[in-house]
Amino acid sequence: MFLGLDIGTSAVKGLVWDGARVLGAASAPLKVQVPVPGASEQDPEAWWHGILAVCAELSAQPGWAEVSAIGLSGQMHGAVCLGPDGAVLRPAILWNDNRAVREAAEMAALPGLAARVGVPPMPGFPAPKLAWLARAEPELHAATTMVMQAKDWVGMRLHGRAVTEYSEAAGTLWLDQAARDWDREALAFSGLERAQMPALGAGTDLAGPLSAAAAAALGLKPGVPVIRGGGDAMVGAAGIGVVAPGQAMISLGTSGQYLVASEAHRPNPAGLVHSFAHCVPGAYIQMAAMLNGAAPMAWLAGVLGRSVPDLLAAAEMADPAHVPLFLPYLTGERTPHGDPKARAGFEGLSHGSGPGEMMRAVVDAIAYSFADAQAVLGEAGVRAASPLAIGGGARSDLVLQTLADVLELPVQRPASADLGPALGAAKLAAVGSGAMPAARLADPPEIGAVFQPRPSARHGARLARYRALYSALRGVCGRP
C-alpha cells in the first residue's frame, strides 16, 4: 500500500493505492488568509493538522499500518520562511499573493534570467516574494535561514530533512532548469544563498525515513520511506501517465494548468509559457498557468448562496441570448497576460440574465482562458492531440464539453480525474521505494468519458469579444 498526500490551497488530500486501485481517499479543508489587499497566506501548521486529519480517516483502511511508502505533492510557488531552529517565522506566502509586483519587474530586467529559470518573473513566484520580504519585513528576511515549499515543509515534519526536488524547485525561479541546479544570480536577487535552499534531487528519490514521532502521529511504522514527489501540476500529470513528449493535461483546480510533457528544456519567455523540470527523472514540461482555474464557479456559488452542481444544472438550461461575457481574473492572471492587477467582471448583463446565465458565462470563460493558453503554447511550437482533464472542475460534463468545443479537440476525463496529484504522489512513492518500475508511470489511465468537439459559431464570436474585453477594460481601469 502506498500513501499519496497532496497539500493543496483549499484542502489537504490523501489516498491509499495498492498498485492497481485506490483503496480509500480523504480530504481536510484549508482556509486562506488575506491580511491586506493582494496578500494570500496560510499557516503551515494548518497543513500538518490537515495531514493528521486525512491520515486519521484513512487509518480505517485494512492494513493501514502496513503502508510501505509515502509520496508527496503540493501547491507550488509558495514561501515558508524558517529560522535557525527550524521554526516558521511567518505565515506562508502563497502562489496567488500579488504584493511583489515591483520586485518581479526588477527581476525580469536581468538579462538572460527568464530563459534559465523557465519563465519571466511574476509576483506569484517565490524569488520576487523574498525580495519583497527584504524590503517589507527586513528583520524577518535577515532571520530566515531556510526557504521551503508546502510539501517539502510537510516532508520535513515527516522525516526531519530539508530536501526538495526539481519540479518544485522549478517553480521558485531560483532553479537553472537546464543545469538542474540553484541559480546564483536568481538567489542573489532575493538576498539568499545556496545554504538557505533545500537539497535537490529527483521526484522519485528518497527524502528520508518516517521518524518515530511522525509515525506515532499517523499510526504508521517508523522508517517507512518518504519519497520526494513533486509540485502538484507535475505530480497530477504523472498520476494520469502524462510523461512522454507531446502528452497533455488540463488541470481544473483552484488554479488551472495546460501542461504538455517534453524531453528537453525549451524556454519561451515571450509567450509566458513555463518551461519547467518534470517530477519524472530527466523529463520536462511546458505549461500555461492560469491563476483562476475552476475557482470562479465556487466564487459565484458563494455569492449567490447556491451550490456549484445546482448552478451548473441551471447553466445547462441557460438562454444563450442572455448569457453575458465574464472575465475570470479574480486574483489577476499569469498566462497569457502576466497581469497581477487584472480583475473579474461581467459584461452584457440584462433582465434575462439569471443565475443559470451567469454560471454559463463563467463556464465559457474557463474554456476561453484555456483557449488563450492553447494559443500561446501553439506559438511556442507545442501541440496537444487530446488532453486529459483532472481536478474538481473536471467532474462537470458541461465544463469539459465546453472545453472540447472551444479548443476544437477531444477532451478525455480519466476515471481517476478527481484524485489528481494525490494519486500521482502514491505512484511516485511506489517507484521511489522500488516496488514499481519507473516505466509504469507512462501507463495510460482508464478513461471514464471522452468529449468530442462540436462545431459552434457561437464560441468563435464570443471568444473574440472576450479577448477584446480584457484589452478594453485594462485601458479603462488605468492599467498599463
Image: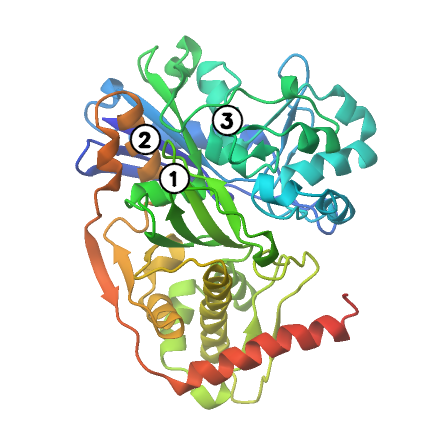
Task: Check whether the beta carbons of the residues at disc 2 and disc 3 lie within 8 A of each other.
Answer: no
Give the residue at mark 1: 235
Give the alpha-carbon distance from disc 1 to disc 2, as whole Å: 8 Å
Q: Residues within 10 Å of mark 2 (few under 14, many from 20)?
A: many
Q: Nearer the viewer, mark 3 or mark 1?
A: 1
Residue displayed at 35% across by 38% down = 422
Q: Image quadrant for the C terminus?
A: bottom right
Q: Residues within 10 Å of mark 1 (few under 14, many from 20)?
A: many
Q: From what the image shows, is residue 213 above or below residue 331?
A: above
Looking at the image, tell me whether mark 1 or mark 2 is earlier in sequence order: 1
Could you tell me the amino acid type at mark 3? Asp
Foreground residue among 160 and 238: 238
Q: Is residue 435 above or below residue 84?
A: below
- Pointer 3 residue: 152
The reply, left or right, for residue 401 in relation to residue 32 is left
For the residues labelled 3 and 1, the Cα–Cα distance comes to: 14 Å
Q: Is residue 186 left or right of residue 445?
A: right
Residue type of the residue flagged with mark 2: Leu
Q: Is residue 181 visible?
A: yes
- Residue 349: x, y in percent? 58, 84
Image-quadrant location for residue 41: top right
Q: Amino acid at mark 1?
A: Val
User: Which of the image's four quarters has the N terminus?
Assistant: top left
Q: Quadrant of residue 115?
A: top right
Q: Which numbered dot is residue 428? A: 2
- Is disc 2 placed on a helix, strand or loop? helix
Label 3 vs 1, first from the N-terminus: 3
Mark earlier in primary sequence (2, 3): 3
Pointer 1 with pointer 2, Cβ within 8 A: yes
Secondary structure of the residue carrying tag 1 is helix
- Which residue: 67% across, 63% down? 342
